[in-house]
Amino acid sequence: MKTLGKKIRLLRHQKGWSQEDVAKRLDISIPAFSKIETGITDVNLSRLEQISTLFEMSVVQLLTFNDTEEQEKYTSELEVLTKKVQEREIEVIDLQKKVIELYEELRRSKN
């Protein structure tokens, strides 16, 4: 639940809302909302739906929402892997060229 709380806090900050603002919109106390953000309180489906509606997203989007740091980490990892794949592709192309050259040499030597 701490991850969900972090996501909710991030969304709240993106909207420029205070905990009090969100608590009022959810019709709960500020301490109750604070416990949701800190992961102390488990959030039931009804509350999840209420929170997702408040942030204009589905419950699934809320539960799978990634913060910027996480996105950057995955993007960085993806870039590294993409570069490795590109390097391998270049190696494969070079090997294909060598095979073709050797084949051509063999063909010439037979004639």
Image: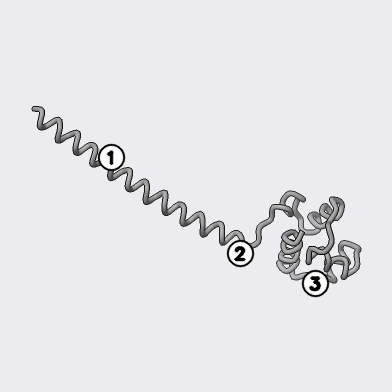
Q: Secondary structure at mark 1?
A: helix
Q: Earlier in the sequence, mark 3 or mark 2?
A: 3
Give the CA separation, mark 3 to mark 1.
61 Å
Q: Earlier in the sequence, mark 3 or mark 1?
A: 3
Q: Label 3 neighbourhood size at 10 Å, few (<14), some (14-19), many (20+)?
A: few
Residue mark closest to the camera, 3 vs 1: 1
Q: Residue at x 86, y 63 (%)?
A: 25
Give the CA separation, mark 2 to mark 1.
40 Å
Q: Which residue is mark 3?
A: 18
Q: Is residue 16 above or below residue 2?
A: below
Give the CA separation, mark 3 to mark 2.
22 Å
Q: Residue at x 82, y 70 (%)?
A: 19
Residue 23, percent from left and from top:
86, 66
Residue 7, percent from left and from top:
72, 61
Q: Which residue is mark 2?
A: 69
Q: Earlier in the sequence, mark 2 or mark 1?
A: 2
Placement of the N terminus among the 4 image quadrants: bottom right
Q: Residue at x 87, y 61 (%)?
A: 26
Residue 96, numbered label: 1
Residue 54, percent from left and from top:
81, 58
Q: Is residue 53 above or below residue 93?
A: below
Amino acid on which the number 3 mark rests in the picture: Ser
Residue mark closest to the camera, 3 vs 2: 2
Amino acid on which the number 1 mark rests in the picture: Gln
